[in-house]
Image (cartoon, rainbow, N blue to C red):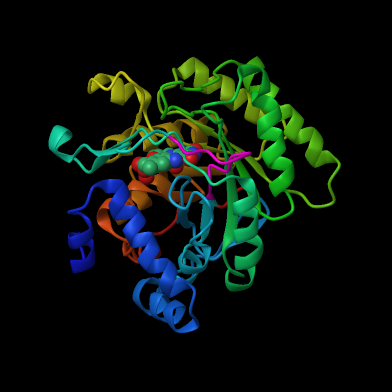
Amino acid sequence: MRASLFQHIVSLLPPEVAHNTRMRIMRIFGALPMGRWWLKQLYAPRTGDLHTEVFGLSFRNPIGIAAGYDNDGDNLSNLGAMGFGFVEIGAVMPRRNPGTPRPRLKSLKRATQSLSLLDQTGYPSRGREHVLGNVRKRRKHTKHLVIGCNISKMTSTHPDNIAKEYLRVFRNMYQYVDFFVINIACATSTKPYEPRTAEDIRAIIDPLFEFRRGQLDYRPILLKVSPDLTQEELDTIIEILIETPLDGIEAVAGSRAMAKELGYTAGGAVSGAMLTERAIETVRYIAQKTEHNYPIIGSGGMMTPDDIVRMMEAGASLVALNTGLRTRGMRLLKKGVKHLTQTPQPTETQG
Ligand SMILES: Cc1cc2nc3c(=O)[nH]c(=O)nc-3n(C[C@H](O)[C@H](O)[C@H](O)COP(=O)(O)O)c2cc1C
């Protein structure tokens, strides 16, 4: 896949600086009507009709942005103008979270000969108040953009308060976003949080279901899972999906096990090309086990249009991009939509 000149220049910078530079430039365009028009001309898909209904929401196309790309929702206007089907903002934290000291995002290109990253960011966030302001303000420019909210554990949260903090963010954001992703694979800091037993996972999601029962509007809740689970642990999550009002699964987050294999024992998760096959196989397993009855967001190593098509064929209803956009550039959306349009889709949308 050919990269643009801009992508070449940006790729010479350290990964976090490159991302922030790109986002800053695009934010300037996103703030102006002319700039949004230009972004649309340059990046928005034009081919075919890939409109899809998933968990009761209407997506203009199935390709969106995974968590950790627009942490604070500062870029909703420009990402909306570029034609993404959805943006999963976050992780949204109950209060400001500086994350790990820089540098904290490492290119693994030399070490692994692949477009992969080591994420040790610790999920920096300007906190839910800032994010709320952005979502409220940007709604008028992002009518066609579905907005998801990712909630993850803060590194500093005391173990006794974990469930309370997930619930706090969930309640605050409830009426402003369209769906939620509850990340239980928070592995980028030195204090990873990856609950794997039914009891620990239910302790987090049951209070969310209870809060939702009292609301007029329904917001789908998905669980985001680690690529490092054993088959037994993944089966536990599938049982939770079937037995509770959980609406779907996002598979997968970054891999802590791969980071350890590469010798990064101090924390961190591998994202990008090294994850592609693991992510697709995890989605295929969940889809087959649930007889394609539940929506799955496929995430992890979606680097090329072909990866996106294979992820949909494995059973994903939606596909979320992160490292692919960082390393290949923003045209991945347009190319992905074009490739999907030219490929017959095997499954009906669930949910
Ligand atoms: C810099 C960075 C920050 C991330 N932050 C979050 C986060 O806050 N919450 C979360 O659930 N996942 C986060 N992720 C994981 C991604 O959402 C995604 O699941 C993972 O990177 C695999 O997809 P990819 O290979 O396309 O990047 C982050 C990933 C990266 C690279």
Q: Residue at x 50, y 82 (%)?
A: 33
Q: Is residue 187 above or below residue 5?
A: above
**Spot occupied by residue 134 in the image (x, y as percentages of width and height):** 60, 60
**Spot occupied by residue 235 in the image (x, y as percentages of width and height):** 54, 21
Tell me which secondary structure the magenta stretch mostly adopts.
Answer: loop
Q: Residue at x 55, y 40 (%)?
A: 292
Q: Residue at x 85, y 51 (%)?
A: 216
Q: In the image, ligand 1 is in what quadrant?
A: top left
Q: Is residue 89 visible?
A: yes
| Quadrant into which the N terminus falls | bottom left
Which residue range is magenta in the image?
A: 89-99
Q: Is residue 286 left or right of residue 163?
A: left
Q: Is residue 237 above or below residue 276?
A: above
Q: Residue 90: within the magenta?
A: yes
Q: Residue at x 61, y 18 (%)?
A: 159
Q: Residue 82: within the magenta?
A: no
